[in-house]
Image (cartoon, rainbow, N blue to C red):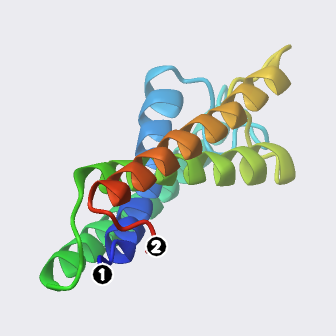
Amino acid sequence: MSNYRPLIIAGLILDIGQGGFFDGIVFHQLLQWHHMFSSIETDRTIAGMELNTVGDGLFHLFDLLLTLTGIFLLWQAGRQAENSWSGQVFAGALLMGAGLFNVVEGIIDHHILGIHHLKLGAHQLLWDLGFLGSVGLLLAIGLFLIQAGKMEKGQLTQ
């Protein structure tokens, strides 16, 4: 019987961290749509930019810790002979991890805490909802890949 659980957990944790890096690099730094606390303190003042820079740094530190944890879990999974390996299952777990990152970021940061929004302005709710819309797509494709990878070896139970 195949055991994909360690591979799936490693992929989920790894890409929750990578999802954070993607968000931070693309939305915080390249597009500059928001920073960690941009709905609390504007980034248009020196004090506000200092606060947001520290917030972004703490966010990236958390992403790094998640990524390193995911790498460690992947290494541990590879050391156990009873664990199964599948590129499809791992890719599916990575996509699901990105989707889970978007759930946490989109629901907690954008809506519950309101510390920032994807893109501030007149249509910020639409941007936030579009961001959450990516969750379903990432989770569905990820789950499909995991199930397909398990069926490849005739194991749909783990």
Give the SS element for disc 2: loop
Classify the position of the C terminus by image quarter.
bottom left
Residue 132 position, x and y percent, is 71, 37
Q: Marks 1 and 2, Cα distance to the nearest angstrom?
A: 9 Å
Q: What residue type is labelled 1?
A: Met
Is residue 50 among the parts visible in the rendering?
Answer: no
Query: In front: 28, or 7?
Result: 7
Query: In front: 157, or 85?
Result: 157
Residue located at (75% from left, 31% from top): 128
Give the SS element for disc 1: loop
Q: What residue type is labelled 2?
A: Thr
Classify the position of the N terminus by image quarter.
bottom left
Q: In this view, does 2 lie above or below 125?
A: below
* Mark 1 closeness class: few <14, some 14–19, many ≥20 residues within 10 Å: few
Residue at the far front: name it. 154
Residue located at (24% from left, 79% from top): 83
Residue located at (32% from left, 63% from top): 154
Q: In this view, does 57 lie above or below 29?
A: below
Q: Name the N-terminal-most of marks 1 and 2.
A: 1
Query: In front: 51, or 47?
Result: 51
Residue 136 position, x and y percent, is 65, 39
Residue located at (54% from left, 24% from top): 32
Residue named by callout 2: 157
* Left or right, residue 10 beside residue 138: left
Q: Residue 1 carries which label?
A: 1
Picture quadrant where residue 130 is located: top right
Is residue 13 among the parts visible in the rendering?
Answer: yes
Q: Are marks 1 and 2 in contact (CB under 8 Å)?
A: yes
